[in-house]
Image (cartoon, grey):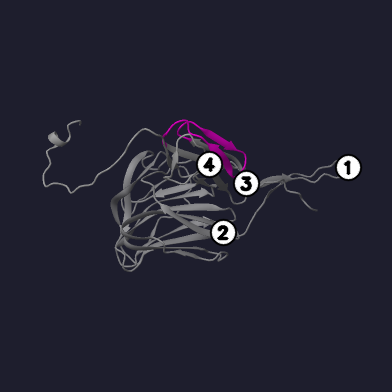
Amino acid sequence: MTVVVPAEAVTSNIAVTTDLALSSNALPFTVNFGGPVLQVAVSDAPLQVNLTSPQTLDWIHWGRISETVPDRRNGVTPLISDYTLINSTQAFAFPENIAFSWTDGNHPPVVSETFADVETYDSGSGFQITVPADTTVKTLNLYAEVFGGQAILHASLSDGSAADITDQSVTDSDIGSKVYSIDFRAASAGQTLTVTFTGAPDAGGVGLQAATLTPHLPVVNITSPAAAQSYPAGGTIPLTVAASQIDSSISAMAALASDGSSFTSTSAPLSANWQPAASGHFVINANALDTTGLSNTASPVEVDVIGQGGSLSVQRTDAPSSVDLGVRGTAD
């Protein structure tokens, strides 16, 4: 018997009907669209992170209570493990530069802007965490830091169905705060994703801040205009937003400029011509929705539209040894 699966179907039911109009009971099925997945993307950590989201399966935050007791999402079975130390016997809770907030924690439920993390400073030391893996694509976002050196992230699946990945792209002479977004899917259920984050031998140390686990969300990027570009007033600016998703397609897209202009599309990419009504500094936001109901937003893009009639200049001189602000700042 051959079953024709409706386009974009992920789960459904099938029943057999005979020529005598007799029907069997309905049996559920799940479509597995592809093979194993293991890949990582690295981005700068935003200065503020809200761990609470209806699309989040689990989250964990380290260091606010102590180096041994993490905050967790309340009301769910934990999926993200606590850390295990690598090449070290002691982690230290310490405040850093990223503010984390949430409204669905286990103790207490609401936390606003905690800067805590856990850190280790031994040569080549770091942390290891694990997450269950199966045949659905998920994303683990790991918020981590390296101090004065190179960071090394290694990820592997327990069934070996996808090649291990090692990322050594992050090097910082001061504090490098990054988000490692790891997409993963095993070849079978009951597997484990293992992630280690360590410093190179000459690094000053590494820090672990938080981790979130979500279904794989659509990937959305504003490809035009590019950030920080300038355009003459009265002209038309090409606007393009790209979006893609593993195992399903994009069903809705929207872009909104801070002048109130909005654009929509029922498929990817979204392409439009934007003509700002006036000169000024503008921010463009965009989002996409896939056919399973998962959504995501693009990083905002800021541009300038330059009019005529104004002037802006700067002059640089050596600073004097003393300054009388009452004389220099007569206007304010």
Q: Amino acid at mark 4?
A: Leu
Dot 4 falls on a residue whose secondary structure is strand
Q: Amino acid at mark 1?
A: Leu
- Residue 264 is one of the magenta-drawn residues: yes
- Of callouts 4 and 1, the N-terminal one: 1
Q: CA distance from mark 3 to mark 4?
A: 21 Å
Q: Position of residue 184 (x, y in %)?
A: 53, 57
Q: Which residue is mark 3?
A: 249
Residue 20, numbered circle: 1
Dot 3 falls on a residue whose secondary structure is loop
Dot 1 falls on a residue whose secondary structure is loop
Res 103 seen here: yes
Q: Which residues are magenta?
A: 257-281
Q: Position of residue 292 (x, y in %)?
A: 61, 43
Q: CA distance from mark 2 to mark 4?
A: 31 Å
Q: Nearer the viewer, mark 3 or mark 2?
A: 3
- Of callouts 1 and 2, the N-terminal one: 1
Q: Which residue is mark 2?
A: 37
Q: CA distance from mark 4 to mark 1?
A: 57 Å
Q: CA distance from mark 3 to mark 2?
A: 18 Å
* Within-10-Å neighbours for mark 3: few <14, some 14–19, many 20+: some
Q: CA distance from mark 1 to mark 2?
A: 45 Å
Q: Which residue is mark 4?
A: 239
- Of callouts 3 and 4, the N-terminal one: 4
Q: Amino acid at mark 2?
A: Val
Q: Nearer the viewer, mark 3 or mark 4?
A: 4
- Residue 248 lies left or right of residue 316; in this view the side is right
Q: Which residue is painted at 88% across and 42% down in the image?
A: 20
Dot 2 falls on a residue whose secondary structure is strand
Res 64 seen here: no
